[in-house]
Image (cartoon, helix red, strand yellow):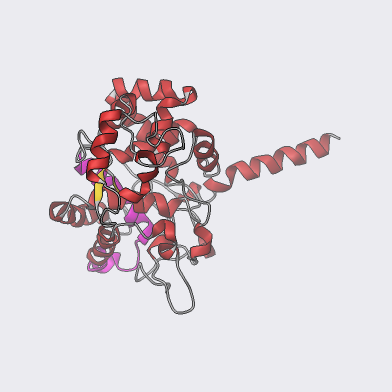
């Protein structure tokens, strides 16, 4: 009986640890003796791209998140589809990923590879992690050291995306379940959700909240009424599907804790945003971070560091791509 219980416990532990497999090889300053200036090379490219368009910020952060939640942080989302394979980026959930995120990584990779000692020595997966860190700090968010040492994945299929990414209509239980599958807690989930402070969305993603929420309430009752009217004005029926609006109506170009203040006011854009305040299980965290920018930033650094450890590829499970959009 004792052996059976031990075996069961070991099995449960192995399941819990799956998302973090390979994270042991990650460390800060991983490239110190390989490509010592890699972080400044990447940062310079990101700064140029940031100066060209602010979309670089939400596009790069979202690209990292969509990469890590599907087969781990392995740059599989960057792979282009071919005649024989429909890649992750062409799954419906990824079609709204802005091109500026992909462009940022591609340009950073090219800049790194112009340095002889760095050529084909730095993974696309690591470049994406560095670039995401850089856009966060450039837009007013925290600066932090990143763990590096990932390999690029060897597989990218649209089928693998199904059911792996959070949807805008998710409730708290659905969000917690999905994040837990990636080794992330409710606190991590709430912190990472705040990246929506610099996000934007197409009207179709929240139209149900302002036009046909339910038979009794066409407008979601948890939505601030004046904000709902503003959204209806910006997103009339039959609106141009390319129109996008800021997810943070107060400070959309600053990575700050305004997201939580917005939730307190009923101006979270998605159901999955506003539920963090309407559900009593998460409300105290929202209230705490609405009061303390510092506490939020510390929690965010912890959460995005843990996100970067999900499904890391090692050994024969990956390689360093010469072209981020194609397998070697």
Q: Residue at x 34, y 57 (%)?
A: 96
238 or 252: nearer the viewer: 238
The answer to whether residue 74 is left or right of residue 13 is left
- Residue 271: % across, % down: 41, 37
- Residue 84: % across, % down: 49, 78
Residue 301 shows up from this direction: no
Image quadrant of residue 320? bottom left
87 or 116: nearer the viewer: 87
220 or 132: nearer the viewer: 220
- Looking at the image, residue 145 lies above or below residue 326: above
Q: Quadrant of the N terminus?
A: top right
In this view, the residue farthest toward the bottom is 83
Magenta residues span: 112-139
- Residue 134: % across, % down: 25, 47
The answer to whether residue 116 is left or right of residue 95 is left
Residue 285 shows up from this direction: yes
- Residue 55 forms part of the magenta stretch: no
Magenta region, mostly helix, strand or loop?
helix
In this view, the residue farthest toward the front is 215
Q: How many marks?
A: 0
Image quadrant of residue 124? bottom left
- Residue 285: % across, % down: 41, 24
Q: Residue at x 26, y 33 (%)?
A: 227
156 or 313: nearer the viewer: 156
Q: Residue at x 50, y 56 (%)?
A: 71
Image quadrant of residue 105? bottom left
Q: Quadrant of the C terminus?
A: bottom left
């Amino acid at each position: 009986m004792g052996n059976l219980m031990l075996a069961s416990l070991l099995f449960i532990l192995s399941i819990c640890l799956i998302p973090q497999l390979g994270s042991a090889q990650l460390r800060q300053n991983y490239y110190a003796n390989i490509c010592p200036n890699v972080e400044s090379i990447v940062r310079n490219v990101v700064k140029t791209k940031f100066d060209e368009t602010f979309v670089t910020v939400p596009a790069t952060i979202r690209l990292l998140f969509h990469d890590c939640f599907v087969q781990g942080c392995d740059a599989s989302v960057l792979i282009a589809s071919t005649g024989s394979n429909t890649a992750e980026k062409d799954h419906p959930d990824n079609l709204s990923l802005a091109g500026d995120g992909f462009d940022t990584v591609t340009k950073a990779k090219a800049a790194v590879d112009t340095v002889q000692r760095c050529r084909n020595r730095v993974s696309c997966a690591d470049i994406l992690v560095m670039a995401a860190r850089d856009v966060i700090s450039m837009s007013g968010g925290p600066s932090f050291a990143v763990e590096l040492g990932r390999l690029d994945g060897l597989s990218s299929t649209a089928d693998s995306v199904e059911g792996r990414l959070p949807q805008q209509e998710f409730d708290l239980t659905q969000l917690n379940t999905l994040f837990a599958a990636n080794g992330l807690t409710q606190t991590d989930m709430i912190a990472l959700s705040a990246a929506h402070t610099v996000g934007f969305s197409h009207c179709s993603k929240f139209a149900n909240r302002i036009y046909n929420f339910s038979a009794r309430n066409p407008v979601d009752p948890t939505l601030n009424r004046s904000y709902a009217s503003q959204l209806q004005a910006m997103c009339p029926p039959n609106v141009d599907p390319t129109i996008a609006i800021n997810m943070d109506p107060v400070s959309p170009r600053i990575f700050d804790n305004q997201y939580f203040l917005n939730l307190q006011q009923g101006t979270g854009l998605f159901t999955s945003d506003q539920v963090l305040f309407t559900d009593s299980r998460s409300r105290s965290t929202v209230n705490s971070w609405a009061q303390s920018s510092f506490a939020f930033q510390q929690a965010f650094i912890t959460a995005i560091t843990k996100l970067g450890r999900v499904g890391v590829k090692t050994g024969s499970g990956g390689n360093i791509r010469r072209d981020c959009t194609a397998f070697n």
